[in-house]
Every structure is written in C-alpha cells, then in structure tokens.
Image (tube, rainbow, N blue to C red):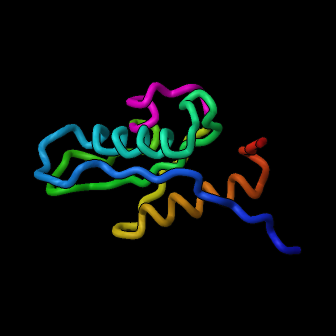
Amino acid sequence: MTPQPVYILGAGMHPWGKWGRDFTEYGVVAARAALAEAGLDWRQIQLVAGADTIRNGYPGFIAGSTFAQKLGWNGVPVSSSYAACASGSQALQSARAQILAGSATWRW
C-alpha cells in the first residue's frame, strides 16, 4: 500500500541574532509566519508536533506542550520529539505519522 502524500503548506523562521529571549518566543514567531504563509488560523490546527531543545545551559527542555501553551493551546494533541540536532526532522516525521494514521486531516 502506498501512503498518501503529506505536504508542508507553510514555513516560518525567527530572525537570526543573539540569543536572549524566552525560547518559546522563537518558535512562536516561526509558527505564526508558517500559519500566515499557509493561510491558516491557529484554531484550524489539529496537531502540534514539537521538537524539544536544550541550548547553552537553558534549564530544561522546551517541550511541544510548552510551545503550544505559548501559542494559545486549543486542546489539540501535542507530541514532543528529542533527537539532538535531528529534533526538527523527528517532529516532522511524528506529524506525518499522525496525519497518515488519520489523527489529523485537512479538507480543501
């Protein structure tokens, strides 16, 4: 059986520069840019796939749930992935698996 294709509708990135903000702020900036590029509203999101990170002694992980709360969590399922420098790609794989399993859908 050939799986259905999964597409990325939008991408976002926080501005480069010096660290110093709350880490969730970087993710929120990127997520809002991706939503805008995709033409989606946060309330349409059915799954949050987060990539945990540790940076320069930051006290703990930034989990997917922490990020979702900062965006204004809407009650959808949240996953967190940690795979060092591959955390982002692991989060994408987690999101893809959830979509292919039918946990999140998109209707045109």
Residue 77 % position (x, y): 61, 38
Residue 66 % position (x, y): 39, 36
Residue 59 % position (x, y): 20, 45
Q: Residue at x 46, y 53 (%)?
A: 11
Count of residue discs:
0
Which contiguous range is marked in magenta? 67-76
Observer-nearest residue: 37 or 72?
Answer: 37
Give yes or no for residue 38 being in the magenta stretch.
Answer: no
On screen, residue 17 versus residue 105, left or right, reads left
- The image quadrant that residue 32 belongs to is top left
Q: Residue at x 75, y 44 (%)?
A: 105
- The image quadrant that residue 27 belongs to is top left
Query: In which quadrant of the rendered image does the C terminus lie?
Result: top right
Query: In which quadrant of the rendered image does the N terminus lie?
Result: bottom right
Residue 49 % position (x, y): 53, 49
Q: Residue at x 56, y 45 (%)?
A: 38
On screen, residue 9 versus residue 88, left or right, reads right
On screen, residue 69 versus residue 108, left or right, reads left
